[in-house]
Amino acid sequence: MKQIYLILLVLFTTISAQAFSFDTLTTESGLRYFLLEKGAGPKAESGKYVEVHYTLKLTNGTTLETSRDGNPFDFIPGKGMVIKGWDEGIPFFYQGDKGVLIIPSELGYGSKGAGDLIPPNTTLVFEIEIMSVTEPKLSLVELLLPICSEGKTDEAIAKYKEIKENEFELYNFRESQLNFVGYKLMRLEKYSDAIKILEFNATEYPNSYAVYDALGDAYNRAGIKEDAIKNYKKSLELNRKNKNAIESIKKLEDKE
């Protein structure tokens, strides 16, 4: 029955949740969420380390991307590492829960959108599953981003290597950490530093499609078309369903 509800909710997102009989909740910010399946683990509260599988859709039902093709997405709610809708919405769930977040554009990517994947002013529908909730390790993002932001990316890479050798158990060593740094640098329009840290990430995680997808985005935003296409194609070799890479390549090649 809830699957039917999900279809209705996606098709009629402008209708008030009160029009339905299910347990849809709307926050003051305009975020809407509901539970599909109840888990039994700890709460994904702010400050915890959370791993989430997700499928991102538009309100017309079109699937944009999914983490199911690779590793769960990992982050710490409340740290500003993700869009506002996730920072607010994920802590409503518990480990093992399956649910849906319906995120208005102002809590997502706003009037700018996100690259070639998400258009401006887009409401996002995330089907989520909370895979794990644990105490966080130290964040590589918080350690390395300030160094990279000052244009000292070589120093940041050297720091990464040092702590990987000497303090590995203290830090969260996942490919997503350096990807976070790369995307943050892109938002600051520090494209050469983003490319450098993501190139390094590709040497650390050469079998991750997400790393090459991020590197493609960095080259794309820097206006280096040939290298953008090369990395998007590498991403597609690892994951043929990567819609961002497919659409980005098409747009870049259409410009030729």
Image (cartoon, rainbow, N blue to C red):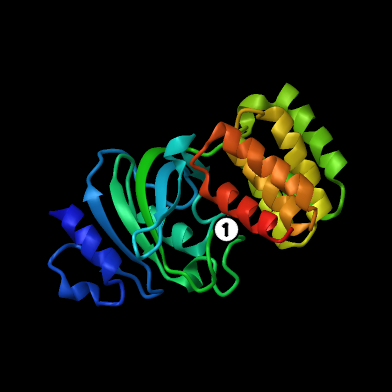
Depth check, front residue: 246 or 161: 246
* Residue designated by label 1: 80
**How far across and how far down the image is residue 141, in percent?**
67, 46
Q: Relative to 229, is 32 on the left or the right?
A: left
**Residue 98 visible in the displayed image:** yes
Which of the pair 205/137 is nearer the observer? 205
Residue drawn at 41 percent across, 74 percent down: 29
Tell me the quarter of the picture where residue 248 sits: bottom right
Query: What is the total number of numbered labels drawn onto the structure image?
Result: 1
Q: In the image shown, does 62 or 80 lie closer to the viewer?
A: 62
Question: Which amino acid type is marked by label 1?
Answer: Gly
Residue 140 appears in view: no
Q: Which residue is drawn at 61% across and 26% down?
A: 169
Q: Which of 2 and 57 is in front in this view?
A: 57
Vertically, is 113 above or below 185?
below
> In the rendering, at what x and y percent does residue 210 appear?
59, 40
Label 1: few (<14), some (14–19) or many (≥20) C-alpha neighbours in 10 Å: few
Dividing the image into 4 quarters, which one contains the C terminus?
Answer: bottom right
Image quarter where the N terminus lies is: bottom left
Q: Position of residue 38 (x, y in %)?
A: 22, 45
**Residue pictured at 83% horizontal, 33% vertical:** 158
Q: Say whether residue 168 is left or right of residue 83.
A: right
